[in-house]
Image (cartoon, grey):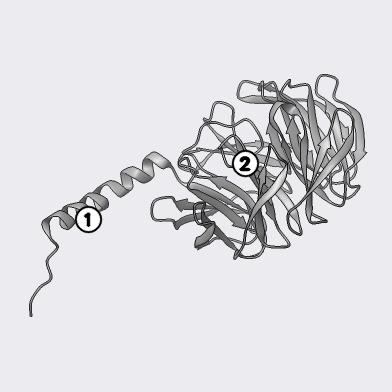
Amino acid sequence: MRKFAFPAVLAGAFAAAVLFAPLARAALGNIVVLNSAEASISLIDPVSQTLIETFPVGKEPHHLMATPDNKSLIVANSVSNNLVFLDPKSGHIQRWVENVEDPYQIGFSLDRKWFVTTGLRLDRIDIYHAVGDDIQLAKRVPLATMPSHMAFSNDNKIVFVTLQISGELAAIDLASQTVLWKMKVGPVPAGLWMTPNDKYLLVGMTGADYVAVVDWRNQKVVKTIHTGKGAHNFRSLDDGRHLVVSNRVASTISIIDEESLTNVGDITGLLPGPDDMELTADKRYLWVTFRFAKHVGVIDMQSHKLIKTIAVGRSPHGIYFFDRAPVTAPNGA
């Protein structure tokens, strides 16, 4: 029997790929996925795009974000009333912070002075002073009903919060920890996105099929952008002009032009319940958690096609990449 032999060039390339794959993964770090209905975290190898580990954390880990210095990745366990800090590269546990009540969504103000948690279950937000690696409670602010997503003004004076059941948007003054105003925006408002120069707030309407454009200074909805049913959460495409919004009920993702405030295209052919999204550093691939399908997926942003799915735990929600610049805005909703 004749044995097959690699040509020398291919053999060398294959050997190099085998040799350097672990180094490439080590440089990129593991991809972290929160399985909110399973109280677990899944780690995915970004090179082979395969699941490498799943381990338990607190109950209902929904959202996550890197610390401003990018030395830790904070996971909010809403029902366990605690935070777990992970190594942002490996995804492994560094430490726990207890007695943080109902942290559903979390976020740092852009000046890193304030740390805010929304209590979806307890109908309030908690505002903390961020002091080095520590947080100190400043005030608990009642905010009914079901406060969920947040965005900060660039002057670090205001945090905006959506109230899912009452259909409102609230503005809270950070210095005084008081509610400045609330306004109706539509059914089940969720994700928030601030457009350049703080001109408008975009609000994903999970109870409808559009994104509301809010002139927040005048407390007025000035436009609606049709997307798909269950418009939920946003992610920038890092091109200075476009962002995407996940439509959880329609199982599509819409691309929004921030200048014209229009929907310029829809990504279809997805699994049920697209939710949180993250973009690779080269802007080529958009990863998305499919909340109702126990999978995450990889979308080629050149073809706008879903090219790979990876099985994880139940109700995957937040997702994080290490191979990106540090962020101070909430990641995942």
Label 2: which secondary element = strand
Q: What residue type is labelled 2?
A: His
Residue ID for mark 2: 242
The mark closer to the camera, 1 or 2, is 2
Residue lying at 80% horizontally and 26% vertically, measured from the top left: 158
Residue 217 is left or right of residue 49, and the answer is right
Residue 134: where, in percent of width, then height? 65, 25
Q: Quadrant of residue 52?
A: bottom left
Query: Which corner quadrant holds the N terminus?
Result: bottom left
Q: What residue type is labelled 1?
A: Phe
Q: Quadrant of residue 296?
A: bottom right
Residue 90: where, in percent of width, then height? 45, 42
Q: Is residue 69 above or below residue 234?
A: above
Q: Camera-side residue: 32 or 216?
A: 216
Q: Which is more N-terminal, label 2 or label 1?
A: 1
Residue 312 is left or right of residue 251, and the answer is left
